[in-house]
Image (cartoon, rainbow, N blue to C red):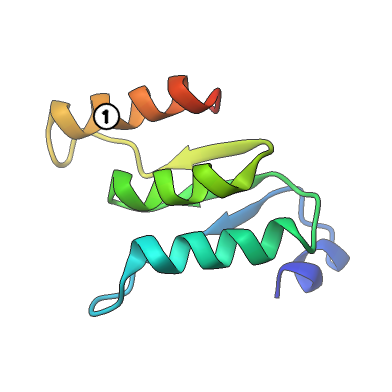
Amino acid sequence: MARAQVKEGAHILDVNVDYVGRDGVRDMHELVSRIVNNVTLPLMLDSTEWEKMEAGLKVAGGKCLLNSTNYEDGEPRFLKVLELAKKYGRA
């Protein structure tokens, strides 16, 4: 799917693994690992849980953006996502 998106002219790939009943941290790690070995586009790690975002950041190695950063779950979660962006040098 990622290669098809590149072929269609995508400039960034939105990666979201939020699916009830699955291990999203494991899924994000696996999916991002596969994507970065097949395409060179920046990734947008999209999740409502910072742990999933960090799992992707650990293996992405390139340009990433973090999505779903808001105050829906309060300031602590928002600040945690900002902390991840700073730690991994991402947007």
Q: Give me the residue at 80% from left, 58% from top.
A: 39
Q: Residue at x 41, y 43 (%)?
A: 54
Q: Please, what secondary structure does the residue beneath circle 1 have? A: helix
Residue 20 vs residue 28: left or right? left
User: The disc labelled 1 sits on which kind of residue?
Assistant: Lys
Residue 26 in view of the camera? yes
Question: Residue sitting at 61 percent across and 46 percent down?
Answer: 60
Percent across and percent down for residue 45 are 50, 49
State the residue at coordinates (79%, 64%): 38
The residue nearer to you, when weighing 69 against 25, is 25
Q: Is residue 50 above or below residue 89?
A: below
- Tag 1 residue: 80
Say which quadrant the C terminus sits in. top right
- Across and down, in percent, residue 72 comes to 17, 41
Q: Residue 77 location, x and y as percent? A: 20, 34
Q: Is residue 16 visible?
A: no
Is 67 in front, or is 84?
A: 84
Indicate the quadrant containing the N terminus: top left, top right, bottom left or bottom right: bottom right
Left or right, 20 with respect to 89, comes to left
